[in-house]
Each structure stands twice: as structure tokens, then as C-alpha cells.
Image (cartoon, rainbow, N blue to C red):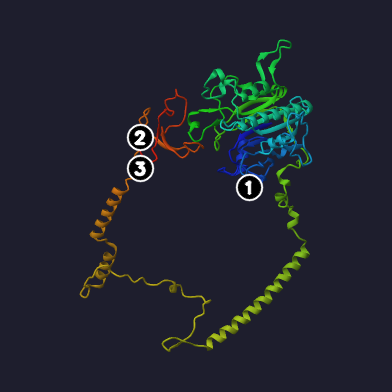
């Protein structure tokens, strides 16, 4: 069994069809994050993909924002599916349950944590390596980002982590195995960051502190049992590749950081310890797959899926806007006798209509042959039918050209006269050329254009002009930076630290 997670950064902005993307990922369960599609923007080619059944969670606070989706192959159809973590969006049958103790959350907070469309849960039957049926619950999440300038978002992120942990551990306690996968938006260890500054306080990041207690720490054994300390889940990639360097899943697109692999690992496939140790074969990163500022992560498992007989009610194909389009072929077929009756009726109507039309046209034709129309000069001519078929030559009119210079052609042969006319029409005068050159020179002196960019000190290459888009006192200001992609300071191919503001008033550098 294969499972993939990918922050796709806009499911509608893909260069190829969604089915082609899903097939290329080659997995039984494909979990996408940051779909940026809300229900009002969801279209059928995205909602219903041949060979897959899909489950979406939509943002209810902003259109085209956040969102996750899980696509399951028909051979991996889940038993149940649910949107959200807190159980406040489960208006359909077939929900998973196991919400745990959420008394520390108010009703308003529980609803708020699910309003941004950040979680979809699907529950599957699997056949384990030792040939036993078991249950696997897959929690697809897009965890919030902590904006340094918005303290409330940091709180929101930590509360989302807390609710995720309560739900995952409760399901694990009651129903088989659990996988949490998606964009967790926190790099766990210095090894997972391209340039971890302030190593002394690196571990003090609240997101990393949460991961430390949520994940199993294989390096730290408890004194009583000798078992690893920490939580109940394993980071599957580090389980198989504990010391792999430069293994990143996210890069800054604006700075071209992917070219120098200057990124972070914030996309995970986390599984409960027993599942990872017994059923996982490998866990990998797929940086070769482009199309987003993230790359997919993938896990291979020994266990195989057991498909449910029917999709859960959360399945996208059951949405009213799509359910009506799923029609059976038999609805387009009619009985033979009925079909013959319909054809006979249509032929009768067509015959009557043609007879009436032909009689009217013949009568009009006879009338036109006996009538004449007077023109302005008193002559009488036969009218030409506008609807008749004209001569092809009637669509072509001779072009009468006027020469731009006077030439005496009275004693010139006809062939030479024609050549003279063509030359007079096509050849520009020297006065016109001089006038165009003078105008061009004038505008060049008046409009000098932007000054050439400065060269960076690190490479002596022309810089690129950027504009500050972040809100603040410098929003809208322009500046020059090295044109090379962002990278580590030790990488000679990466961007140097050249920076130069552009003066708004004079256009000069400051």
C-alpha cells in the first residue's frame, strides 16, 4: 500500500489535468493540502476524478483559502470519512467519532479551529503483513502558520496542534492504527532546516516543543521500562533516514531557493509506533516533482487496502451540485418502438414544414420575375435576390491605387507604366525617412528610460529590481538585490548579501 502527501499550493492552478497528477504520484491514498478551493469554486473535473473518490474540507472564512482534500483509489474506498477535528462539522452519517476530552476548548473555539478547512479524516480497512484485518485512520492536515506580526495566529496554531493530538491519540486508543500526514508547518530538528540560526534557542520554538512531546524520541530511553520517551507517533522519514542531510520539502519560490536546495522539511508522514515498525517499508521525499513550493512525501507499506462497498456520505460525488450529473447509461436509451414513433413524428413535421416553405418560395420567385424596379436614372432593371447564390468573382473588387508622385506616362509602354506605379507606391521618400529619424532621436532624448541596474559586489553581475509587498512602512518601496537564487552563505552559486534601496523621488539609488 502506498500513501502520498503534498501541499499542492492551489489545486486549480495545475498545468496538467488532476487525474494525470494523481496517476503520476502512484499511490492508493493521496492527501493534498492548501487546495485553495472553496465549495463555491469547486468544479466537476476537480471534484470527481475517474478511478478515485474524493473528500474535501473547505474554508468557511475566506474564499479560495486553505483547504485540504483526500483522494482514494476505488480499491481503497474508506469505511468512514469526516471533515474537521473537533466534531462540529459532522452533519453527515458515517463520521468517525472518538473526539476525546475537549473540555478545555469552548464551543466557539472548536468551531473556529475547523472553519478554515484544515483537516479531513478517512478510515480504512487494511490487511496487515501477518494476514489480519485491522483499521487504519488517515488524518490529512494543513496546520496553521504562525505569523510573527499576528500573535493571535501563534495561539491559533498551538491550539490546533493540541486538538490534533487529542483526536489522534483518542482514535489510536480505540480503533487500530493512525497516520497523521500533511504540512505541519514546523521543522523539527536543526537537520530539517537549511540554515538554523540561534541554535541555543532553536528548541524553544513552541511548535518544536509540541513535536518533541508528540513524537517518539528513540534516543532517550525511560529509566523504568527502557522504552523511548516522548509520545506515541514516529516521524517515518527520520525512522528510515535518521541522519540524511539536505532533505527538505519546502522552498521559497520568490527567491528561487529550490535551485540551491535552501529549504526546510515541514511536510511529514507520522504513524503510530507499532504501525511504522511493523508495516512501513520506507518513507521518502520526492523533490523531483515540481508544480508547487512544496514537494510530495511518500510512504510504502506492507499492508494492503480492503475497499468498502460504498463511499461514505462525505464523498464529493454526493454533493447536490454534482450528484445530479451522475446518470446511468440506461437513462439515455429508449425502447425500439418508442424510438420509431418519435422518428415518424419528426419526419411528418419536417415534411409539412418543407412543403409549406417550398410553395412559398416558388410563389415569391414567380412574383419577382414579373416585377421590375425603377432606379434613380429612370432605367428599369430586374432585382437581384439577396438570398441567391452570387458569382464568386463578385466578392473581389479591383484595387484602384493612386500614385504618390506625378509621372508623364503618355509615351511610356504599358508594362513600364505599371512598374512605375508600383515603385511610386512602395518606395518611401528620403524626406519621410529623415523625419522619422529626427522624431526617434527627439523622443530618445526626452524619454531616457530607467537607469541600468547596479552590479552586486559578490559576483559583479547586474542586480534585479524587487518591490516590498509586505504590509508596513516600506510597503511599495523598490530595492535591488543579487539576481542569483537564495542559498546558504557558504554556497558560491547562491545570492550574495548585496542590497540597495531605490529613492522614490529621484529614481536614484540611496
Quarter of the image that includes the C terminus = top left
User: Which of 15/57 is in front?
Assistant: 57
Q: Which mark is residue 450?
A: 3
Residue 152 at x, y percent in the picture: 62, 32
Q: CA distance from mark 1 to mark 2?
A: 44 Å
Residue 117 at x, y percent in the picture: 67, 38
Which residue in the structure is indicated by mark 1?
41
**Mark 3: which secondary structure?**
loop
**Left or right position of 320 against 286:** right
Residue 92 at x, y percent in the picture: 77, 42
From the image, state whether disc 1 or disc 3 is nearer to you. 3
Question: Closer to the N terminus: mark 1 or mark 2?
Answer: 1
Q: Which mark is residue 454?
A: 2
With respect to residue 61, does 399 lie above or below?
below
Q: Within 10 Å of the Cα at label 3, are there few (<14), some (14-19), or many (20+) other Cα atoms?
A: few
Residue drawn at the location 24% of the way across and 61% of the way down:
429
Q: Quadrant of residue 297?
A: top right
Amino acid at each position: 500500500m502506498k500513501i502520498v502527501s503534498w501541499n499542492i499550493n492551489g489545486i486549480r492552478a495545475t498545468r496538467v489535468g488532476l487525474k494525470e497528477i494523481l496517476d503520476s504520484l502512484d499511490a492508493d491514498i493521496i492527501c493534498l493540502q492548501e487546495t485553495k478551493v472553496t465549495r463555491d469554486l469547486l468544479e466537476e473535473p476537480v471534484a470527481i476524478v475517474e478511478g478515485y473518490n474524493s473528500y474535501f474540507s473547505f474554508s468557511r472564512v475566506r474564499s479560495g483559502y486553505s483547504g485540504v482534500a483526500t483522494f482514494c483509489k476505488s480499491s481503497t474506498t474508506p469505511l468512514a470519512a469526516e471533515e474537521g477535528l473537533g466534531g462540529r462539522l459532522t452533519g453527515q452519517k458515517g463520521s468517525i467519532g472518538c473526539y476525546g476530552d475537549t473540555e478545555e476548548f469552548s464551543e466557539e473555539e472548536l468551531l473556529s479551529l475547523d472553519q478554515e478547512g484544515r483537516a479531513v479524516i478517512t478510515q480504512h480497512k487494511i490487511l496487515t503483513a501477518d494476514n489480519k484485518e485491522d483499521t487504519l485512520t488517515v488524518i490529512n492536515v494543513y496546520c496553521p502558520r504562525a505569523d510573527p506580526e499576528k500573535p493571535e495566529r501563534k495561539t491559533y496554531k498551538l491550539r490546533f496542534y493540541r486538538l490534533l493530538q487529542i483526536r489522534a491519540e483518542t482514535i489510536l486508543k480505540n480503533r487500530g492504527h493512525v497516520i497523521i500526514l500533511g504540512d505541519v508547518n514546523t521543522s523539527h530538528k536543526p537537520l530539517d532546516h537549511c540554515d538554523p540560526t540561534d541554535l541555543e534557542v532553536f528548541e524553544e520554538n513552541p511548535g518544536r516543543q509540541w513535536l518533541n512531546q508528540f513524537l517518539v524520541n528513540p534516543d532517550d530511553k525511560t529509566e523504568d521500562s527502557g522504552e523511548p520517551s516522548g509520545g506515541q507517533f514516529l516521524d517515518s522519514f527520520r525512522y528510515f533516514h535518521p541522519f540524511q542531510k539536505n532533505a527538505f520539502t519546502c522552498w521559497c519560490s520568490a527567491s528561487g531557493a529550490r535551485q540551491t536546495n535552501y529549504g526546510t522539511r515541514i511536510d511529514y508522514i507520522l504513524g503510530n509506533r507499532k504501525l511504522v515498525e511493523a508495516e512501513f517499508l520506507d518513507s521518502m521525499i520526492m523533490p523531483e516533482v515540481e508544480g508547487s513550493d512544496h514537494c510530495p512525501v511518500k510512504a510504502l507499506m506492507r499492508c494492503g487496502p480492503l475497499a468498502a462497498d460504498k463511499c461514505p456520505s462525505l464523498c464529493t460525488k454526493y454533493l447536490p451540485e454534482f450528484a445530479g450529473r451522475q446518470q446511468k447509461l440506461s437513462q439515455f436509451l429508449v425502447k425500439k418502438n418508442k424510438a420509431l414513433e418519435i422518428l415518424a413524428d419528426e419526419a411528418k413535421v419536417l415534411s409539412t414544414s418543407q412543403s409549406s416553405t417550398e410553395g412559398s418560395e416558388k410563389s415569391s420567385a414567380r412574383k419577382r420575375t414579373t416585377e421590375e424596379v425603377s432606379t434613380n436614372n429612370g432605367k428599369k432593371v430586374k432585382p437581384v435576390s439577396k438570398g441567391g447564390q452570387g458569382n464568386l468573382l463578385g466578392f473581389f473588387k479591383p484595387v484602384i491605387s493612386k500614385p504618390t508622385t506625378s509621372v508623364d506616362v503618355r509615351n511610356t509602354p504599358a508594362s513600364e507604366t505599371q512598374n512605375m506605379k508600383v515603385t511610386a507606391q512602395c518606395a518611401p521618400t528620403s524626406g519621410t525617412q529623415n523625419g522619422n529619424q529626427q522624431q526617434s532621436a527627439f523622443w530618445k532624448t526626452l524619454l531616457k528610460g530607467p537607469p541600468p541596474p547596479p552590479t552586486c559586489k559578490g559576483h559583479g553581475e547586474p542586480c534585479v529590481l524587487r518591490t516590498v509587498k509586505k504590509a508596513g512602512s516600506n510597503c511599495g518601496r523598490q530595492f535591488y538585490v543579487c539576481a542569483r537564487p537564495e542559498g546558504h552563505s557558504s554556497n558560491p552559486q547562491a545570492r550574495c548579501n548585496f542590497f540597495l534601496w531605490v529613492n522614490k523621488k529621484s529614481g536614484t539609488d540611496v
